[in-house]
Amino acid sequence: VANGGTGVTSSTGTGSVVLSASPTFSGTANFSAININNGAADGGEVVWQSSGFNAWTMDNNSGRLRGYYNVTENFSFFNNGGLALGQSYTGTTPTANGAIIQGNVGIGTTTPYRKLSVKDTVAAAQVSVAYDDTRDTQLQTDSSGDFVINPSGDDVRINDDNLWVCAGGSCPGGTISGTGNAIIENKLLVGTSTRTAVFSVADTGSSGYVDVSPNDGAIEIGSGNDAASFIDFKGSANLSSDYTGRILYQDGTGFSLSTNGAPQLYLTSAATNAAKLGIGTSTPTEQLSAAGLLFIGANGATGMGTATSTFYGDIKINGKLDVSTIDPVYTIDGTKYATYGHSTIGIHEEVALKVTPASYDAKRKLYDYAIAFPEAPMGSDVWLFYQVTDFGKNWTNLVVTLTPGFDGRAFYEQDIANKTLHILTDKSGPVSVRLMGSRYDYTKWLNLRPDQDGNDAGTHVISSKPESESTQ
């Protein structure tokens, strides 16, 4: 076809055909090679046109092959092996052998609704991200709509960043310090998918531990079974499965506190508020039961301390109560004052009262005040004293001290048969009476203690007085 020709309708045979200007082809043309060159720097162009202006055009411009529909550029192949798709991207050179795409890309779908949509209705993963042919990570959206990550190395790492797990479509505001943190907005469940607490741990194994420590197991929280839960405390040199201290709760039994594997303190469970605390015993019978000795000291004292412990209510001690000092504290006008109880040899009870003998015996010329112990008003001092004492045979265990409030005589007489004590004076006036008697169980409490083991800690250590010369 010569320059300025209008093209051909058909051609057969072999050889070279040179087309110049703008030839138009119709029908069928078969070429083993086509070299289009208009002699300019941008090369030539090829136009496909069906009718009117619905035309596709390809040309070679500045090292790239451009594709147009009508006059709009839609894609470009670059001489670095890159591809640009999209009307706004064709003028941008991609990285070597790379691709830049303006719209959505669909793999396995004709309706991609994100920049990359991958669809494959299979049980296997839809996407594989691989290091090589043997090391990869499978990404899958399963039939429940859940996202599954399955790396062949079995680990998922988030390096030098934080993991936020949020509810409601967005995460809460605020900035956490540092990286390597996990922020859970709702619940954190370990070993369970059905618990409702904010933090739940379930382990059907033999340990059931939750470790809280800078090392291995300084504090362990666990459950041996549904009926028993515990908190274990461990020393720095005791990081095995054993524990230094344990708080255990057992259904039907209650709480126990153990040290070095041996329970020491028990708090039994009860349906009411009558729970019992046992020290050294797992079967306390009272609200506080101690299997050994009970010591109260102040400021960490190892002997008899300076404790000022206060007890509200009654304390029942079946054994001996050793008290070095009884010190009720009285605060008067903001200043504290102490009083001291006296000690006696033997166990006694005493009562003090003041009487005025008024019954006059003219024959004896004496005034009489009769204390009939059985007739004392119930609950009175005299009545209680009489109930809790043992006067002994002939009232040998009853000691009477009289102090008259006048210059005169005061003495007493015992009417043992009628259980009456007579206070007699030669004048009618007040008399202070002090009665002291052996307690009803005095025979149980001897002066010689049974614990003669040589341990004198907390006692008053003295030496006996020398015998007088007259007895040597």
Image (spheres, rainbow, N blue to C red):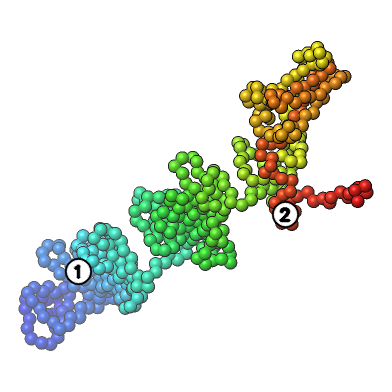
Q: Amino acid at mark 2?
A: Gln
Q: Residue at x 79, y 24 (%)?
A: 412
- Could you tell me if residue 75 is visible in this image? no
Residue pointed to by mark 1: 57
Residue pointed to by mark 2: 452
Residue 51 in the image: above or below residue 290: below
Q: Residue at x 50, y 65 (%)?
A: 241
Nearer the observer, 126 or 311: 311
Q: Amino acid at mark 1?
A: Thr
Mark 2 touches mark 1? (CB < 8 Å): no
Q: Tag count in the figure?
A: 2
Nearer the observer, 127 or 56: 127
Q: Nearer the viewer, mark 2 or mark 1?
A: 2
Q: Give the Cα separation between the discs numbered 2 and 1.
A: 119 Å
Q: Is residue 82 left or right of residue 231?
A: left
Q: Residue at x 65, y 22 (%)?
A: 375
Check disc 1 and report its element: helix, strand or loop.
strand
Q: Position of residue 5 (x, y in %)?
A: 12, 76
Other residues around mark 2 within 10 Å, as few (<14) / some (14–19) / many (≥20): few
Residue 346 in the image: above or below residue 292: above
Q: Residue at x 46, y 40 (%)?
A: 272
Q: Position of residue 318 (x, y in %)?
A: 62, 44
